[in-house]
Image: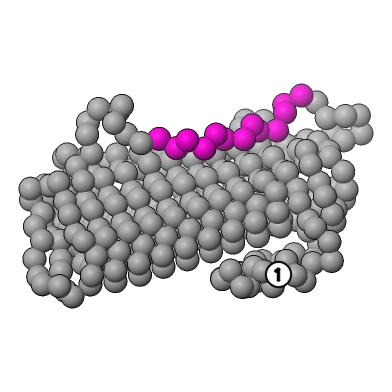
Amino acid sequence: MSEWTVSEPEKITFDEPVGTLHVRIVGGTVNVVAAEGPARLEVSELEGEPLQVTLEDGVLTVAYKDLHWHSLSELKSIDSVKSFFGSLRRKRRAVVSLTVPAGSEVKLGSVSADTTVSGIAGEVAVHGASGDTTLVGLSGHIVANTVSGEIAAQRVAGDLKVNTVSGGVTLVAGAAEKILANSVSGAVTLDLDVANPTDIRVTTVSGAVGVRLPSLADARVEAGSTSGDLTSTFEELTVNGSWGARKLSGQLGSGTGRLQVTTVSGAVTVQRRPDADDDRPVLTKELPAGPALDEPEPGKEI
């Protein structure tokens, strides 16, 4: 096993192949980008405790020595996040950028750090608490969990599973074959490109749900809300029932796909997406730059 301690801004190039990436940090920023060539790490800012970097059997890990996955999995509420920060002896913040092969498996964990993953075709899992998560151009199995952070995804395919408490979820130009989104009070907005059958299931308590589908969408739709409004621009979908048990339902195309929305008090809107690309919403968040591709300082290359 190769091991390094990073206590100040540093660049490292890894000549050994990397197939899996694990990152566990507290605050700051994590940016992971798919790129050809050897994996690279750049720590451009670092406050507090040093980061431990290891590479063993193709698994690259960048983390604090005392921050484990089970600690991050326990952050399920705002109070638990506050308690975690109260337990730290001093502030921990890192700005970390990595390039890895597109087929890599990526698993990221953070407390308040903002996270961006771009261009990865392997499995991606992001577990955060209050930091925002941005996913761009992913095509494998994707899982994103957060408490209050926003989750924004653009041009993702494969399977997408999202869980949030109060953070909003936005999927733009999505072509995922299966989407599962669970939220308590966070709004869920899905803008889908794919006209092929797709399995979409959304569950919220009070969070509003908005879905835009192509005009040639192929799905059986069933959306229910106890007290929230139900609306649609598809003539094939109708609203039935009385207050307390209203449903928006119908069939689009041959109905081989599925759109199922369940909410207690959130409003549900199902719209026909305009064909013109100019009418499509876009993510306004600018992606951080990837790590510099120039050679590291002498003695830093592996």
Instruction: Work out which residue is located at the far bottom of the displayed protein and give it.
Output: 244
Who is closer to the viewer here, 90 or 174? Answer: 90
Residue 149 lies in quadrant: bottom right
Instruction: Work out which residue is located at the far top of the displayed protein and give it.
Output: 294
Q: Is residue 191 visible in this depiction of the protein?
A: yes
Say whether residue 129 is magenta.
Answer: no
Which image quadrant: the C terminus?
top right
Which residue position holds label 1? 84
Q: Which residues are magenta?
A: 282-294
Secondary structure of the residue carrying numbered label 1: helix
Who is closer to the viewer here, 68 or 83? Answer: 83
Who is closer to the viewer here, 257 or 280? Answer: 280
Residue 279 lies in quadrant: top left
Who is closer to the viewer here, 206 or 65? Answer: 206
Dot 1: within a 10 Å radius of its alpha carbon, few (fewer than 14), some, or many (20 or more) residues?
A: some
> Residue 240 at what x, y percent from top left?
8, 66
- Does residue 45 appear to the left or right of 191 in the view shown? right
> Residue 181 at what x, y percent from top left?
38, 60
Say whether residue 293 is magenta.
Answer: yes
